[in-house]
C-alpha cells in the first residue's frame, strides 16, 4: 500500500504587505519581497507519495514559492504611501490599421507625440509583435516615454554644447527613438558633471538623476554607486542632502541584494541623525525604523525589535499615540513578531495600527487596506480562514476604490487571496485571481518586471499542484528569466525560483536537474544572506529530501542536521520550522528502521506544534499521521488508530470533510484496518479517499491514482481480480502519463497489473 508521508512543502511567498515607515530624510517606498513559507503537506513514502502500503505525513518538503504580496513603506513626513504607478486610461483599444485621423487622438490619450506613436507601431511591425499585444505594448512604451520626458524637463544647463546634446535627446524622444534619447540624456549629464564650474549641489542632483535612470533599468548596484557619488559631491555644501543620497544608495543596495552595503549606508544615516543639534527625534525614529527592517532581513531579530520599539517610543512622544507614523512602526514590529511566531503580540499591534489608521485616514484609505492585508496573513497562518478572507476582500475593495481596478496594488491583493484559495482547494477561484493579477501587472509594468515574475511563480505553483507540469515549468522558467534579468544571477529571489523549479523536477524524478538547481539555490543564498540564514536551512531541507528519495541517507541526515542547527539558532528550539525539520529527519530514521530515534523526533515536533500553533492546527495533524504510521509499522495498532483519528478530526475541522488533505489519512487508516482484517471499514475508507481525490483534482491526478492503486491492491489481496484490475489499470495509465514509464509508481502499478493478468 502507498505510505502517505505528508511532507511539508515550504512555499516561498513573496507578496505580503508590510509597512515600513520613516520620518525625516529617510524614504523607503514600494514593494519589498520577503520569503514566506507555506507548509503544504502532500502524500508520499520516499518523498511525497507512493511506496507500497501505509501512508505518512511528513513535515517539510520542497520549497515552492508562493509569492505573497508585501507592501513595504517608509515615509518621511505625511501619510504612509504604498506608491502608485501611472495607469493610462484603457478606453481606446489599439489595433492594426489605425485610421490617420485617429493617430492624434490616440497619441494624446497615451501622452506621446504623433511621430513617436508612428515610430512605435513601425517597430512593432518589424519585430512581428502579435496584433493582440499592441495595446499592452504601446501603453508600456508610452510610460517609458513620459518618464524620459520628465527627466529631460528636470535637467537644466547653461552650457551651449550640453544644451545642444539635450536638444538632440528631445528630438529623438519626439520621434520615438527612446534608446537614442536615453543615451543622449546620459551623455549630457556626464558632460555637465565634467564641467569644472558645476556647483556641488547641481552635480549632486545630476548624479541622482543618473542613479534614477539606472534604477529604471533595474541596474540597482550601479544606481547605488551614483547615489554615493552624489552624497560625496554635496557633502561639504549640504550634509543633510548628502545623507539623503546615502539613504537612497542603501535602498538601491538592498534591491540589489547587497545587504551589508545597505546596512553601512543606513547605519551612517542613523548615526548622523543622532548628532544633530537640536536633536531631530522624528528623523531618528524614521532612521531606526528603516534600519530595523534591514536587521529583520538579516535575522538580527533582537536588534530589530529594539529599534522598532525605539521608533514607536519616539513617535508617541513627539506625535502622540494616535499618529499614523506610530501605526506604521506598529505594523512593522507586528511583522517581526509574525516571523517569530509571537502571534498574540502581532495581532495586538496590527489591531492597534488599524484603529489608528481608520481614525486618521478613514476606513476607505489605502493604508488601511495594507494593514487589513497583513492581519489577514496572520489569520491565514492561524487557520482563521474566514476572518482572513474577509480582511483580504476588504483590502481589495478599498484598493479598487483608491487606485482603480487596474492598479498593481490590486494585483498584489489578488495574489494573496488566490494563495488563500489555493490552501482551501478552491483552485478555479485561485487561478482566476492569479491570471487577473498577472494581466494587471503586465499592463502596468510590462512583461519583464519582477512583480510579473512573482505572479508567474504563484500560478506555476497552482499548476504544479494540479499536475499541469508543462504549464508550471514554463511559468517557473519565465519567472527565473525575469529575475535573472532584473536582479542578476546571484540574487536571493533567483534562488527562490531555482528552489521551486527544482521541486517540480523532483516530483517528476528528474533528480539530476533537481539537484543542480537546489545546489545553485544553496550557493546563492549562502553568498547573499549568509550560511546561517533560515532560507539556507529551508534549502538544505529540500536537498535532504531529494537525497532521502535517492537513499543517500548519510548526505540527507547531514543536511537535515545542518538545517536544524540553523533554525534553532535563528528561531530558538520551539519554532514551527524546527518542528518541521524534526518531522523530516524522523521520516529519514523511519525509512532506515531506526524507530526509537524517529519516535523521539516525532514527539518533539508534536510538542512544539501543539504549544506554538495549538492542538487543532493542521501541522499537528501532519505529525499525528506520521507518528501513527510509525506505530502502525511497529504493530502498536491501538496507538496508531488513535493518532490517525486525531489527524482526521483536525483536518475535517480545519478544511472541511471533502478537502484533499483528508484523503491521505483516510488511506492510512484504511491500511491499518486492512492489516487488522477489518475489511469492510478498510474498503469504505479507501473509497472515501478516492472520492475526495477525484472531486478535488479530477480523475487523472496522481493522488487519485495512488488511491486507485491501494484499493486495487486491497481487492487483489481479497482475491477479487474483477474489482482490482480496472483500478490497477487506471492507476497505471495515470502514473505513466504524469511521471513516465520509469517512475517507481509506474513500475509498481505495472507489476500489480501483470500479477492480476496471470
Image (cartoon, rainbow, N blue to C red):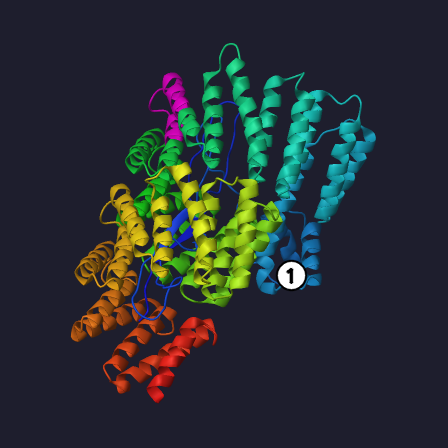
Give the residue at the far top of this rendering. 278
Q: 52 or 19, which lies in front? A: 52
User: On the picture, is 269 further left or further right than 361?
Assistant: right
The residue at which mark 1 appears reads as 99
Residue visible at 44% across and 76% down in the picture = 736
Residue 91 visible? The answer is: no
| Above or below: residue 453 compared with residue 55 | above
Residue 712 image offset from top left, x and y in percent:
29, 78
From the image, give the main secondary structure of the stretch colored magenta: helix
Residue 346 image offset from top left, x and y in percent:
32, 35
Q: Quadrant of the N terminus?
A: bottom left
User: On the picture, is 495 further left or further right than 327?
Assistant: right
Q: 285 or 188, which lies in front? A: 285
Residue visible at 56% across and 47% down in the picture = 523
Which structural element holds mark 1? loop
Tally the numbered discs.
1
Around disc 1, counting alpha carbons within 10 Å, would you say few (fewer than 14), some (14 to 19), or many (20 or more)?
few
Residue 683 image offset from top left, x and y in percent:
21, 74
Residue 495 image offset from top left, x and y in percent:
53, 49
Q: Quadrant of the C terminus?
A: bottom left
Region of the chain picked out in magenta, as a range: 309-330
Amino acid at each position: 500500500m502507498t505510505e502517505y508521508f505528508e511532507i511539508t512543502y515550504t512555499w516561498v511567498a513573496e507578496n505580503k504587505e508590510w509597512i515600513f515607515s520613516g520620518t525625516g530624510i529617510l524614504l523607503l517606498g514600494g514593494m519589498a519581497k520577503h520569503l514566506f513559507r507555506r507548509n503544504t503537506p502532500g502524500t508520499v513514502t520516499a518523498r511525497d507519495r507512493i511506496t507500497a502500503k501505509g501512508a505518512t505525513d511528513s513535515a517539510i518538503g520542497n520549497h515552492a514559492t508562493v509569492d505573497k504580496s508585501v507592501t513595504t513603506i517608509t515615509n518621511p513626513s505625511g501619510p504612509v504611501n504604498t506608491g502608485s504607478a501611472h495607469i493610462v486610461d484603457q478606453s481606446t483599444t489599439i489595433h492594426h490599421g489605425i485610421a490617420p485621423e485617429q493617430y492624434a487622438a490616440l497619441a494624446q490619450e497615451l501622452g506621446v507625440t504623433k511621430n513617436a506613436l508612428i515610430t512605435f507601431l513601425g517597430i512593432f511591425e518589424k519585430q512581428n509583435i502579435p496584433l493582440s499585444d499592441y495595446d499592452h505594448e504601446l501603453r508600456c512604451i508610452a510610460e517609458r516615454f513620459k518618464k524620459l520626458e520628465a527627466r529631460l524637463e528636470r535637467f537644466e544647463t547653461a552650457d551651449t554644447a550640453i544644451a545642444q546634446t539635450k536638444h538632440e535627446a528631445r528630438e529623438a524622444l519626439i520621434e520615438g527613438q527612446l534608446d537614442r534619447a536615453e543615451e543622449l540624456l546620459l551623455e549630457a549629464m556626464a558632460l555637465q558633471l565634467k564641467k569644472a564650474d558645476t556647483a556641488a549641489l547641481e552635480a549632486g542632483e545630476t548624479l541622482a538623476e543618473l542613479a534614477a535612470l539606472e534604477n529604471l533599468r533595474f541596474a540597482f548596484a550601479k544606481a547605488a554607486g551614483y547615489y554615493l557619488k552624489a552624497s560625496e559631491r554635496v557633502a561639504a555644501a549640504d550634509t543633510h542632502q548628502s545623507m539623503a543620497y546615502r539613504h537612497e544608495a542603501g535602498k538601491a543596495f538592498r534591491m540589489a541584494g547587497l545587504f551589508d552595503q545597505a546596512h553601512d549606508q543606513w547605519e551612517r544615516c542613523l548615526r548622523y541623525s543622532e548628532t544633530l543639534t537640536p536633536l531631530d527625534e522624528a528623523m531618528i525614529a524614521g532612521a531606526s525604523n528603516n534600519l530595523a527592517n534591514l536587521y529583520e532581513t538579516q535575522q538580527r531579530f533582537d536588534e530589530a525589535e529594539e529599534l522598532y520599539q525605539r521608533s514607536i517610543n519616539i513617535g508617541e512622544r513627539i506625535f502622540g499615540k494616535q499618529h499614523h507614523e506610530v501605526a506604521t512602526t506598529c505594523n512593522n514590529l507586528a511583522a517581526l513578531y509574525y516571523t517569530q511566531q509571537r502571534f498574540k503580540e502581532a495581532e495586538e499591534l496590527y489591531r492597534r495600527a488599524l484603529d489608528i489608521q481608520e481614525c486618521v485616514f478613514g476606513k476607505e484609505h489605502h493604508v488601511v487596506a495594507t494593514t487589513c492585508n497583513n492581519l489577514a496573513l496572520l489569520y491565514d497562518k492561524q487557520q482563521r480562514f474566514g476572518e482572513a478572507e474577509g480582511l483580504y476582500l476588504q483590502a481589495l475593495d478599498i484598493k479598487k476604490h483608491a487606485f482603480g481596478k487596474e492598479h498593481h496594488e490590486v494585483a498584489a491583493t489578488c495574489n494573496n487571496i488566490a494563495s488563500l484559495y489555493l490552501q482551501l482547494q478552491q483552485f478555479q477561484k485561485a487561478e482566476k485571481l492569479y491570471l487577473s493579477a498577472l494581466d494587471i501587472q503586465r499592463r502596468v509594468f510590462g512583461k519583464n518586471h519582477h512583480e510579473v515574475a512573482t505572479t508567474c511563480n504563484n500560478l506555476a505553483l497552482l499548476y504544479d499542484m494540479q499536475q499541469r507540469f508543462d504549464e508550471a515549468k514554463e511559468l517557473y522558467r519565465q519567472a527565473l528569466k525575469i529575475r535573472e534579468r532584473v536582479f542578476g544571477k546571484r540574487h536571493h529571489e533567483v534562488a527562490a525560483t531555482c528552489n521551486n523549479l527544482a521541486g517540480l523536477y523532483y516530483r517528476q524524478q528528474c533528480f539530476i536537474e533537481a539537484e543542480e538547481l537546489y545546489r545553485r539555490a544553496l550557493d546563492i543564498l549562502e553568498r547573499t544572506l549568509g550560511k546561517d540564514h533560515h532560507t539556507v536551512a529551508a534549502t538544505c531541507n529540500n536537498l535532504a529530501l531529494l537525497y532521502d528519495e535517492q537513499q543517500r541517507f548519510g548526505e540527507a541526515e547531514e543536511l537535515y542536521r545542518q538545517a536544524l542547527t540553523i533554525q534553532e539558532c535563528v528561531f530558538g528550539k520551539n519554532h514551527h520550522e524546527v518542528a518541521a525539520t524534526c518531522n523530516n529527519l524522523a521520516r529519514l530514521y523511519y525509512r532506515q528502521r531506526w524507530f526509537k530515534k524517529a519516535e523521539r523526533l516525532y514527539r518533539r515536533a508534536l510538542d512544539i506544534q501543539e504549544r506554538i500553533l495549538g492542538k487543532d492546527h493542521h501541522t499537528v495533524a501532519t505529525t499525528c499521521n506520521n507518528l501513527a504510521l510509525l506505530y502502525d509499522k511497529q504493530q502498536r495498532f491501538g496507538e496508531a488508530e488513535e493518532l490517525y483519528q486525531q489527524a482526521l478530526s483536525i483536518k475535517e475541522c480545519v478544511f472541511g470533510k471533502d478537502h484533499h488533505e483528508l484523503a491521505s489519512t483516510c488511506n492510512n487508516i484504511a491500511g491499518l484496518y486492512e492489516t487488522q482484517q477489518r475489511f469492510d471499514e478498510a474498503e469504505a475508507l479507501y473509497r472515501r479517499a478516492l472520492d475526495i481525490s477525484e472531486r478535488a483534482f479530477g480523475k487523472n491526478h496522481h493522488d487519485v491514482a495512488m488511491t486507485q492503486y491501494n484499493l486495487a491492491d486491497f481487492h487483489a489481496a481479497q482475491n477479487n481480480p474483477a474489482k482490482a484490475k480496472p483500478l490497477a489499470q487506471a492507476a497505471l495509465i495515470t502514473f505513466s502519463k504524469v511521471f513516465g514509464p520509469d517512475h517507481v509508481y509506474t513500475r509498481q502499478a505495472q507489476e500489480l497489473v501483470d500479477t492480476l493478468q496471470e
